[in-house]
Image: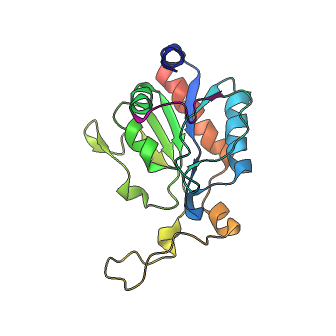
Amino acid sequence: ERKILRELLLRNDLIVVHAGRHWQSKTFPKDWWDKVLRRIIDQGKTPVLIGANTDDNRGTVDVETHGCYDLRNKLSIMESIAFLQRSKVLLTNDSSPLHMAATGSAWIGFIATCKHADYITHWRKGGWSWRMENHGLGGIWEVLDYCPNRPSKVEVENVGDDLLRSWLPDPVGFADWGIEKLNDSQG
């Protein structure tokens, strides 16, 4: 994997994609992610899939891998951080790879449907959200009370497919943002 990582870092056509799986409020449908990946490939770029299945509930969506470098379940946390720190573009729905990529200068396109975007952006290069953009159209925080004094637990499960899909941007537009940023970083 280290040899592969070194070789990948020399390439200029890579977009790192983390299709995270966890709560229903942040596990996007396979067909949505497949459209993102297909668009990247059709535009002459190569998706690099990252992430790890840590238990039955947390991991990555089982996407179509044809045309992708699939590094899921192959990198340690430190290797993931090093790779993301040197990557040019990350597309994700999970805050963990977002935080790793924020240690470098990557463009970070994310979709915040579970945690409010204000809680996961970073101060980089003298400002909030430098090279970071939330593409989400809403989230669970709009329908739940997150007050810390709330007597009952905040529920992030039981989100219907229609509600979740209403929070998602067009997958082609999301992919195109990453492609545009990758092209900008080369020019």
Nearer to the camera, 21 or 115: 21
Q: Position of residue 83 (x, y in %)?
A: 44, 27
Q: How many marks?
A: 0
Q: Quadrant of residue 106?
A: top left
User: Image point 45% across, 41% down: which residue?
Assistant: 97
Q: Position of residue 53 (x, y in %)?
A: 56, 45
User: Image point 68% across, 45% down: which residue?
Assistant: 62
Residue sitting farthest toward the front: 55
Magenta-colored stretch includes residue 26 = no
- Drawn side of residue 98 relative to residue 178, left or right: left
Q: Is residue 81 visible?
A: yes
Q: Main secondary structure of the magenta part?
A: loop
User: Image point 60% across, 56% down: which residue?
Assistant: 27
The magenta segment is: 69-77
User: Image point 74% across, 30% down: which residue?
Assistant: 66
Q: Position of residue 128 (x, y in %)?
A: 31, 47
Color theme of the render: rainbow
In the rendered view, tell whether residue 67 sits above or below residue 26: above
Q: Position of residue 39 (x, y in %)?
A: 71, 35
Q: Is residue 187 visible?
A: no
Nearer to the camera, 95 or 167: 95
Nearer to the camera, 11 or 42: 11
In the rendered view, tell whether residue 41 sits above or below residue 108: above
Residue sitting farthest toward the bottom: 151
